[in-house]
Amino acid sequence: MLDYSHPVCARHYSDEFFDADIPMYLEHARRSGAPILGLGCGTGRILIPLAKAGFRVVGLDLYPSMLSVAGEKIAQLGESTRKRISLIQADISHFSLKRCFNMAYISANTIFQLSRREQRKCLECVSGVLKSGGTILIDCESPSSMSTAQECVGMLSRFDDYPEDASEKTAAVRSWITCVDLADRRMKVRTEITEESSDAKVEKCAYSHTLHWFGRIEMERLLSECGFRTTRVYGDWDMRRFSDSDHRMIFVADAIIANRAQ
Ligand SMILES: C[S@@+](CC[C@H](N)C(=O)[O-])C[C@H]1O[C@@H](n2cnc3c(N)ncnc32)[C@H](O)[C@@H]1O
């Protein structure tokens, strides 16, 4: 877990280059069509491949630091791809848009960063902007994966040292789980970032985040209460059917509220 509001974390987010989930989003984009809404789009890791494949996309993210890295990446694309991408700074648990979408996605555990109330608010907001029959994908780790986190409390889960960048600073990011509450499905993570400039000046900051995870039934119920019908749950990005031992849980749900925009 990084602190996405911090420029060091935003700059190095893309270093964690993982792309195994992208074919799944492309496949669903082909089925649903554009436009597509990326919630918590970050540095555009998924948004950009979708735009390159010809889909119009809108990405929402709370943090200017992440959006600015996305903007730099987008600026390097060809004009026609660039024109298919819009970025908006917004809280995904509190937004409204004039446009309607055929597909929306919340990738890479982003949903866990929202409190229970915000998770509901987020799905209500998405429900307001998806066309009838439009699809939402929510990708997160499953309860079986989160339970193993309990064994890791207090252990460093991340320690990255970044070499000097253009501002001649070195940076170190350390994070670890400080608490896992299995009954309440909450986990606390602490991240410390230390930056040292070439004149040995050291700046430190620390953040604590709570992650809120859930079980399959809980999410299906929430989706239903927010106007969606879950059509599939995958156990991984290869789109195989979810089983309890799977470490990922990917919900695919269709918008069913009759009076939404067409
Ligand atoms: C795990 S990253 C995922 C980024 C990107 N979707 C991906 O898959 O690479 C989570 C992203 O959600 C954003 N985020 C967290 N809380 C948010 C909120 N309330 N509203 C909008 N964005 C949020 C963070 O800034 C970060 O970019």
Image (spheres, rainbow, N blue to C red):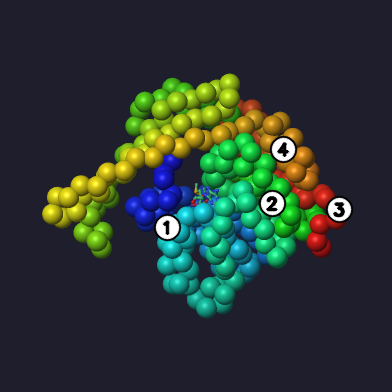
Q: Quadrant of the C terminus?
A: bottom right
* Residue 20 horizontal/vertical position (percent): 52, 49
Q: Are marks 1 and 3 in contact (CB under 8 Å)?
A: no
- Determine the CA span between mark 1 and mark 3: 38 Å
| Mark 2 residue type | Cys
Q: Secondary structure at mark 2?
A: helix
**Quadrant position of residue 167:** bottom left
Q: Are marks 2 and 1 in contact (CB under 8 Å)?
A: no
Label 1, on which residue? 65
Left or right, 246 with respect to 201, comes to right
Where is 37 relative to 175, above or below? below
| Mark 1 residue type | Ser
Left or right, 178 with respect to 140, comes to left
Label 3, on which residue? 258
**Quadrant position of residue 10:** bottom left
- Determine the CA span between mark 3 and mark 2: 16 Å
Q: Nearer the viewer, residue 258 or 104?
A: 258
* Residue 178 horizontal/vertical position (percent): 41, 28
| Mark 3 residue type | Ala
For mark 4, does the 10 Å Cα neighbourhood hold few (<14), some (14 to 19), or many (20 or more) residues? Answer: some
Q: Secondary structure at mark 1?
A: helix
Q: Going 23% across and 51% down the picture, which residue do you hit? A: 170
* Residue 53 horizontal/vertical position (percent): 60, 66
* Residue 194 horizontal/vertical position (percent): 27, 44
For the residue with label 4, is its CB less than 8 Å from the closest atom of ligand 1? no
Label 2, on which residue? 125
Eye-nearest disc, 4 or 2? 2
Q: Earlier in the sequence, mark 2 or mark 1?
A: 1
| Mark 4 residue type | Leu
For mark 2, does the 10 Å Cα neighbourhood hold few (<14), some (14 to 19), or many (20 or more) residues? Answer: some
- Determine the CA span between mark 4 and mark 1: 31 Å
Label 4, on which residue? 222
